[in-house]
Image (cartoon, helix red, strand yellow):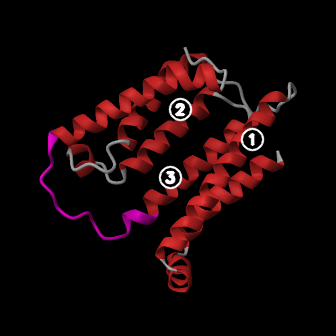
Amino acid sequence: MVKLWIGVLLFGGVHLLPMLVPTVRSQIVSRIGENAYKGIYSLAAVAGLVFLAMGYMTGRSNPASEIFYGPIPALRHLTLLLVLAGFILIFSNGTKGYIRKYVRHPFSWGVILWSTGHLLANGEKAVVIIFGMFLLLSFIDVAVNSRRKPLAAFAPNGLHDLRGLVVGVVLYLIFLFGFHPYILNIPVI
């Protein structure tokens, strides 16, 4: 569990601190420069993900891993739908399509849907901690960034939505039929 909490602190900390205290980022950038800041930020986030993964795998190897709650089997299909919608929103984030125009912060909303789906499907302690952190960070991101300046106006292009849709669906299928059953050894279907 220690690795899991180190991951939460590293990954959550590097995302949460600049959101809640934006002056911290500007102070660090003024001291070390933009590129050095981005490098340290990226390394800390990746290290956090590695610790989260190690903590999760350690928890899975323990046969007596704690279960906070049992998933409701009827929600399995809802989970699949939420995660699919989440992937599409995540990959529509950098586009100039209708999704990006009408869904403020599609990346964060995508992570909210993805995390919610995983929380509906699995009540293991490690899963609840990891996806609960992602969910919390994403809600905070939406709340904080909704107060900032609005997006610059642009004419939406449906091809951008198509790109987000295709990339989202393809990666969803890769995760559904490849990553989950063969890497995590957790069949989804």
How far across and down, in percent of the image, does residue 167 sit? 34, 34
Q: Which part of the image, by quadrant, shows the N terminus? A: top right
Residue 79 seen in the current view:
no
| Label 3: element kind | helix
76 to 94, vertically: above or below: above
**Disc on the earlier residue, 2 or 3:** 2
Location of mark 3 (residue): 138
The residues tagged by marks 2 and 3 sit, at their Cα atoms, a distance apart of 14 Å
Left or right of 176 in this view: 86: left
Instruction: Count neighbours of disc 2 (C-alpha within 10 A) and say few if under 14, some if 14 to 19, many if 20 or more.
Output: many
- Mark sitting on residue 54: 1
Location of mark 2 (residue): 117
Query: Which stretch appears magenta?
Result: 144-158
| Label 1: element kind | helix
- The residue positioned 70% from the left and 58% from the top of the image is 9
How far across and down, in percent of the image, does residue 94 sit? 31, 51
The residues tagged by marks 3 and 1 sit, at their Cα atoms, a distance apart of 22 Å
How far across and down, in percent of the image, does residue 140 sit? 51, 59
26 to 140, vertically: above or below: below
User: What amino acid type is highlighted by mark number 1?
Assistant: Met
- The residue positioned 50% from the left and 79% from the top of the image is 33
User: What amino acid type is highlighted by mark number 2?
Assistant: Gly
**Disc on the earlier residue, 1 or 2:** 1
User: What amino acid type is highlighted by mark number 3?
Assistant: Ser
